[in-house]
Image (tube, grey):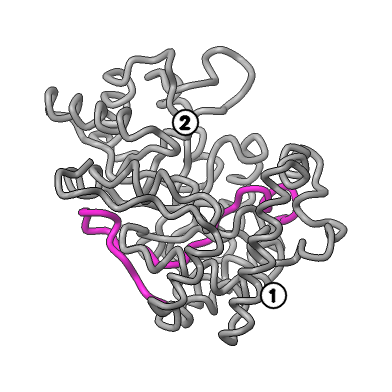
Amino acid sequence: MKYRQLGNSGLKLSAISLGSWVTFGKQVDVSDAKALLQCAYDSGVNFFDNAEGYEAGKSEEIMGSAIETLGLPRDTFVISSKVFWGGSKPTQLGLSAKHIRDACDAALIRLKIDYLDLFFCHRPDIDTPITETVRAMHNLVQQGKILYWGTSEWSAQQITEAHAVAAAHNLTPPTMEQPQYNLLHRERVEAEYRPLYEHYGMGTTIWSPLASGLLTGKYNKGIPAESRLTLPGYEWLKERWDSNEGQINQRKIQQLTQLAEDNGISLTHLSLAWCLKNSHVSTVISGASRLSQLKDNLKAIHVIERITPAMLEAIDGIVGNKPPEPDRFGQ
């Protein structure tokens, strides 16, 4: 396994990490989770990602029980949670100081740990002043309940405001962002966030590197039974796949599949390794419902060096979404 700094922090994360979205609590029970976590851990994975909103906390309960049973030494792994969607009541939603504190305490109980390494604001909250959110996260750091806090799918402007608030009030600023990043979705990470890397040393723990499984190529000949596109609650993903944009992406994926095959690698490995070619990616969060999937995903770490400049150029020609380089004035 290779390890990367989380932005300008001293924390090193495995280049490939294990996430629980969609899988834990829906496709994965405690027994399955134990097998997945042990395999990942034995392979050098040291970051496990979770959130209060994943299966209404069930995902955290499963991960916590599995880790406790396995007896993994707490100083050998990094674990996260996210706050925003905690329930249906007004006080269970958003990024108010109350919900942030309550969500952290609840996550610690479900995960059966004393502190969170990473705690993310799962989405921006337009109803809560950023100052309140930053101060609430700072307080958790001061209390030793979290070590680093960050954001997920915040705009560059919102993240900049959070840093400005932290600087003005001597509070702990966000260390990392968790954005979607893959071959079909790259504008935010590669363009919008450029100033954040330079000015604040932000790290990124990217999600959906395989575009919810689309970039494995398994949908090239139709939708397999029990795949993510068939799961209850993910009808939106099926609708997106059937849309005009989805049809265009299907053709791109077929071309990417051929490019990968021509170079002797799988589309899955190409897609994951492509994300890791970006030096601003601290870790790629992979998901898996079966051991075979996890083991295959982890092999992508050995493909990074095989992604040549010529291949990158060919990939850009297929996907056609590379953000323009900034001019000498940074515009």
Tell me where the magenta segment starts and ends, as one range: 1-29
Q: Amino acid at mark 1?
A: Ser
Asked whether, in this view, residue 317 is left or right of residue 264, the answer is left
225 magenta-colored: no
Quarter of image, res 19: bottom right
Pick the residue in front: 9 or 124.
124
Q: Position of residue 252 (x, y in %)?
A: 64, 61
Disc 1 marks which residue? 292
Give the SS element for disc 1: helix
Image quadrant for the C terminus?
top left
Rendered residue at 65%/34% (across/down): 56
Which residue corresponds to the image point at 25% horizontal and 26% vertical from the top-left?
A: 161
Q: Nearer the viewer, residue 256 or 89?
A: 256
Question: Can residue 292 be seen in the rendering of this structure?
Answer: yes
Q: Which residue is mark 2?
A: 123
Residue 149 point in image, percent of width and height: 33, 40
Q: Main secondary structure of the magenta part?
A: loop
Residue 296 location (% of width, % of height): 62, 76
Residue furthest out toward the bottom: 264
Side of 275 relative to 57 (left or right): left
Q: Residues within 10 Å of mark 2 (few under 14, many from 20)?
A: some
Q: Is 8 above or below relative to 292?
A: above
Q: Is residue 12 magenta?
A: yes
Q: Secondary structure at mark 2?
A: loop
